[in-house]
Image (cartoon, rainbow, N blue to C red):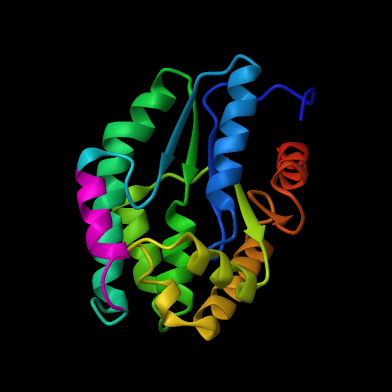
């Protein structure tokens, strides 16, 4: 991963993908690489990334699939995201740091807007009102949904609410992220998630 073009200051990068795609690993690896190249990098995540947003995270990712409706989820995600932006993302960008977020608004567009009812208009309206910013570059780590679910089962833990919605839901998510990339080719890059993590990281760095 050495070499490559230097990244401009004040860059906002997000990683997206279905559950178990390996996006968190790739976000961490890119952060490590950019730090080695001399950049200040803030590595963060959603839902979460600030004290208030982390409290909301537990409400969203734990418990049964039926815990919240998609409409309620949209409101909770936007509340967490607003706090994340105010307390973590904007201050980092203001000092010309690179921000790498493990998920951002595209997850809400796909998880709640495109796959759990036709809620895209509501998602976009709330985004315009309360969030307003977009990443400069978004990487979608693309893998087979059955592999993602297997990884999630092997990982264990309590944050399995969305995995519990089953293979059909994960297949809808994959299609939703592919459609998003087609709609926003100037920002969103699909990354082949097959192979070892170092191999995938090379693909990410080349796409950046």
Residue at 47% across / 52% down in the picture? Answer: 103
Per the rendered image, the range of residues in magenta is 52-64
- The residue that appears at 54% across and 72% down in the rendered structure is 149
Is residue 134 on the magenta stretch? no
Task: Out of 149 and 190, give the one closest to the viewer.
Answer: 149
- Residue extending farthest top: 38
- Left or right placement of residue 51 versus residue 43 in this view: left
Q: Position of residue 42 (x, y in %)?
A: 45, 29
Viewport quadrant of the C terminus: top right
- The residue located at (42%, 44%) in the rendering is 133
Q: Is residue 114 above or below residue 36?
A: below
Q: Main secondary structure of the magenta part?
A: helix
x, y percent for residue 9: 56, 21
Above or below, 8 against 48 in this view is above
Kindly indicate the quadrant of the structure image that contains residue 191.
Answer: bottom right
Side of 189 relative to 108 (left or right): right
In the rendered view, does 54 fall on the left or right side of 160? Answer: left
- On the question of residue 19 being in view, the answer is no
């Amino acid at each position: 991963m050495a070499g490559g073009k230097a990244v401009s200051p004040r860059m906002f990068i997000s990683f997206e993908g279905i559950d178990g795609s390996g996006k968190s690993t790739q976000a961490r690896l890119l952060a490590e690489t950019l730090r080695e190249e001399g950049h200040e990098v803030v590595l963060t995540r959603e839902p979460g990334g600030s004290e208030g947003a982390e409290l909301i995270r537990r409400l969203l990712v734990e418990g049964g699939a039926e815990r919240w409706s998609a409409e309620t989820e949209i409101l909770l995600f936007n509340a967490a995201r607003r706090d994340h932006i105010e307390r973590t993302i904007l201050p980092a960008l203001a000092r010309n740091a690179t921000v790498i977020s493990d998920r951002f608004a595209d997850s809400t567009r796909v998880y709640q807007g495109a796959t759990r009812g036709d809620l895209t208009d509501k998602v976009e309206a709330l985004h315009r009102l309360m969030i307003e910013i977009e990443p400069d570059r978004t990487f979608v780590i693309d893998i087979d949904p059955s592999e993602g679910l297997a990884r999630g089962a092997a990982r264990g833990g309590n944050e399995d609410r969305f995995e519990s919605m089953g293979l059909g839901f994960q297949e809808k998510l994959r299609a939703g992220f592919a459609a998003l990339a087609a709609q926003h080719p100037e920002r969103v890059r699909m990354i082949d998630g097959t192979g070892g993590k170092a191999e995938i990281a090379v693909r990410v760095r080349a796409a950046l």
